[in-house]
Amino acid sequence: MNPLKTIKVFEYQTLKAFDPKYEDFTDKHLEALEAFHGISDEETFPYYSLIHHGVRFRNHVGVICVGGLTIEVLPKTDDNDTDEDRWQSRLLHMLSRVYKLDVRTPTDAPQDCQSNSPILDLFINKFLNEVDQLLNRGLVRCYHKEDKNLKSLKGKLLIGKHVTANYIHQERFYVRYTTYDQEHVLNRILYQALRIIPRVTSNLSLRGRASSSLFNFPELHEISINEELFKHIEFDRKTEDYREAIKIAQLLLLHYRPKNKSGNYDILALMFDMNKLWEEYVYVILKKQFTKYVVRAQSRHSFWENKIIQPDIVIYDQFGKKPLLIIDTKWKCPTDNKPSDADLKQMFVYHLYWHVSDTVLLYPDTGRQPFSGQFQKTKNQIDFSGLKCHMMYFPIIDI
């Protein structure tokens, strides 16, 4: 398998077939993306919209692998900063912190056999590391019932099925029995994720490791993969070690479409909502740095009837009782360096409901200066001047 060809674009950028700048992107790739888009409607498909002879990306970043081509969709906060390598490095750093990926992991594959998608390879490497640890500890087992036509009587005889199936072969018994094996739903998810890895990466080291893990895995029955399956997974003392591996398996399996469902090519779209990724990145960094405080994400408060308000990050005192600061993360910086009216009204509500004097609108650092403003008195002289909203900027570290 030859190394994947790579195209780098930015969020909200347009990619068209027959564009000389992106000659590796052909009409066949476009047909596959159109078929992939067809699994949903225009309003709910999150990654890109269809345009004439091409696609326009939205606010999701990451990697799309289609027909030997890797499309890396990179974040960007400043229209003047179009350094693709720098933004790829920043994206890798954010993903590594949020998903606990080791960006320093070396590869044993020769340079000409490596994938051109470090984003995808980081996740696959993390997944294989987790699977190897599970195999070394021993896969979890479970009890379950099986119906089979056997040569010996075992368990409960199913009379109806026995008569139908063994009208001629009366030496057999159609039975239901209980077995204790590795056909656990978590093992089956990992097994299916391992099987798609050779189809989505050209990194020989990772493909070899996936094949080795499959060799050491028991051959398991396939399971229907959908979002509901992962919503109902619960981890306990025996299965807690599966959590990280399942998290990445979910990313791979839910975003993979074989060629019979996506045109002539397999597609893997490992894409992330940039607003959500920025929020999670800031949360991870602040939680590590603010060791003397309690940092919580997505605190909820009743607002109106069954409506709730939910700031991105709330910083509490050391006991986790008194809220001290509320932070709302914003990936896109305002063009005029002033917050929108909607954002200010939202922060004002946070002031009132959490009883804090300071709130922060936190943007990625683009070299702008922080700015603070305070809310004013009302006409009937209710004084809100002690409530301040700050515009602040958070650095993104390059790897």
Image (cartoon, helix red, strand yellow):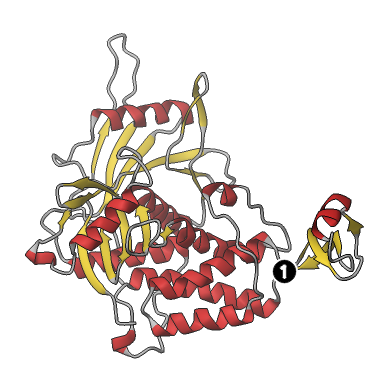
Is 151 left, or right, of 279 in this rendering? right
Q: Position of residue 42 (x, y in %)?
A: 30, 40
**The N terminus lies in which quarter of the figure?**
bottom left
Is 25 left, or right, of 240 in this rendering? left
- Residue type indicated by callout 1: Gln
Residue 361 or residue 153, whichever sits in front: 153
Q: Residue at x 81, y 64 (%)?
A: 149
Residue 119 or residue 192, whichever sits in front: 192
Q: Residue furthest top?
A: 380
**The C terminus lies in which quarter of the figure?**
bottom left
Residue, disc 1: 182
Badge 1 local density, few (<14 within 10 Å), some, or many (20+)?
Answer: many
Can residue 393 be seen here? The reply is no
Position of residue 133 relative to residue 79, above or below, is below
Q: Tell me which corner region of the image, top left, top right, bottom left or bottom right, holds residue 164.
A: bottom right
Q: Position of residue 121 (x, y in %)?
A: 39, 73
Q: Secondary structure at mark 1?
A: loop
Can residue 136 be seen here? The reply is yes
Q: Residue furthest front?
A: 168
Q: Position of residue 255 (x, y in %)?
A: 42, 57
Position of residue 389 relative to residue 146, above or below, is above
Residue 219 or residue 271, whichever sits in front: 219
Q: Residue at x 57, y 55 (%)?
A: 224
Q: Position of residue 167 (x, y in %)?
A: 84, 59
Q: Tell me which corner region of the image, top left, top right, bottom left or bottom right, holds residue 352.
A: top left
How many numbered marks have been drawn onto this rendered protein structure?
1
Q: Residue at x 21, y 51 (%)?
A: 55
Position of residue 364 relative to residue 122, above or below, is above
Q: Residue at x 78, y 60 (%)?
A: 146
Q: Residue furthest left?
A: 20
Is 388 left, or right, of 129 in this rendering? left
